[in-house]
Amino acid sequence: MARHTSSALVPSAWVLLAISTLVALTLGVGLAIFHYQQQSKVILNTGETLFRHISQQLETELLRLYQPPAQALNLLALSDLSSTISLEQRLNYLPQLAQVLVDNPQLNSLYQGWPTGDYLMLRPLRTPSLRTRFNAPSDAVWMVWHIQMDPEASKAVHLFYDQQLQVLEQRELFNDGYDPRQRLWYSQARGSGAQIITTPYIFFSTSEFGTTLARPTTSGSVLGADLTLGQLSHTLAKLQLTAHSQLLLYDPEGTVIAYHDVARILNVAQGTALRLKGFNELGSTLLARLAEDGYNQERLTSMVLEGQRWTLSQSRIDLAGLPETYLAILVPERELLAEAYRIRRYSVWITLIASLVLLPLAWLFITRLTRRRV
């Protein structure tokens, strides 16, 4: 009778062992899923914080780019440069103009246009390519371009200066018809009566891209400064969250101001004018798809694009005195949640290993318990 009872209890031991193993695995997998879900929520919430942090950093960068030159133009507008009528008088103000350019390396050039059509520009020759372009002396650091309008014949000259603003060479130029009064920066500033910022474009003389700050003076002349925006793309590249995330700044018309891959911003197609690309011209079907929804979007959402789910943030960077700008951040969720995936995978493996380790102990415990009952 005892032997029959013992043999009957053996299957019960296997049943108990199977049930305990199943419970352990279920609890382990359940905990792994729970941890994954909680970790995913934490990471997604952290992602929102990161998006806001990136936006704040770019706001700081935009202020750093725009505010100092804008303040410098306001101060220059108070000088007597606007009341000068000859090249000799205007050259006395070169030290002031040069100091503004030294203090603001993001400026490509600084200039002033008069109601008579006269024009004065000071340009730093910071690169060998600029010296080559203007055939400047090897030790030239500054170049002045001056146009003196005359009813009979206007005069244009280039003057090259060294670091100490000592003149190295003066060249008479053929006036190609440049008239500051016909330029957009001049007419917009005169029309608004206040400081303006043009939409981004390619600077003809250097092929850099940027925008022009301009403001009228009390005498009717207009001060202008060309501000390059290339540094913004380098800032975006440093802020890239994952290997395949995409960050870009663009204006309300969809023109890209900055992109983490700066080489893709310029449209250099043969036979076309050099210009900045639009939101949907960067060679990305992902961005082209987003452009279909319009450019002036402000949202934080996720969507399936190009066969995978992306976390998308679009926000407006609206700073007083600066042009309206939008920031788009796109991150593949599989990359954003890579840490959560890793934790889930490790949790499952830990559960399986723990179950395998505990299985012999459970078997030993159950068999001993069975023998005692027998």
Image: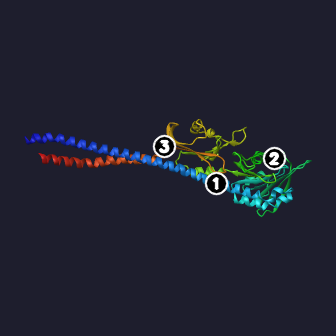
Residue drawn where x is 54% and y is 50% of the image: 52
Distance CA(mark 3)–CA(mark 1): 31 Å
Percent from the top left, x then y, of residue 73? 73, 56
Residue 101: image quadrant is bottom right
Q: What residue type is labelled 3?
A: Glu
In the rendering, which numbered label is found on residue 63? 1
Specify the amino acid type for callout 2.
Answer: Arg
Residues packed near mark 3 inside 10 Å, few (<14), some (14 to 19) or many (20 plus): some
> Which kind of residue does numbered mark 1 sit on?
Leu
Identified at 64% across, 54% down, the residue is 63
Left or right of 372 in this view: 83 = right
* Label tally: 3
Q: Are marks 3 and 2 in contact (CB under 8 Å)?
A: no
The quarter of the picture where the C terminus appears is top left
Residue pictured at 23% horizontal, 49% vertical: 361
Q: Is residue 97 above or below residue 1?
A: below
**Residue bearing the label numbered 2:** 181
How dense is the environment of label 2, judged by Cα within 10 Å: few (below 14), some, or many (20 and up)?
some
Circle number at residue 333: 3
For discs 3 and 1, the disc positioned in front in the rendered view = 1
Q: Quadrant of residue 90?
A: bottom right
What x and y, as percent, mark residue 114? Answer: 82, 51
The residues bearing labels 3 and 2 have C-alpha atoms spaced at a distance of 52 Å
**Circle 2 — which element?**
helix
Sequence-first disc among 2 and 1: 1
Q: In this view, does 52 lie to the left or right of 94?
A: left
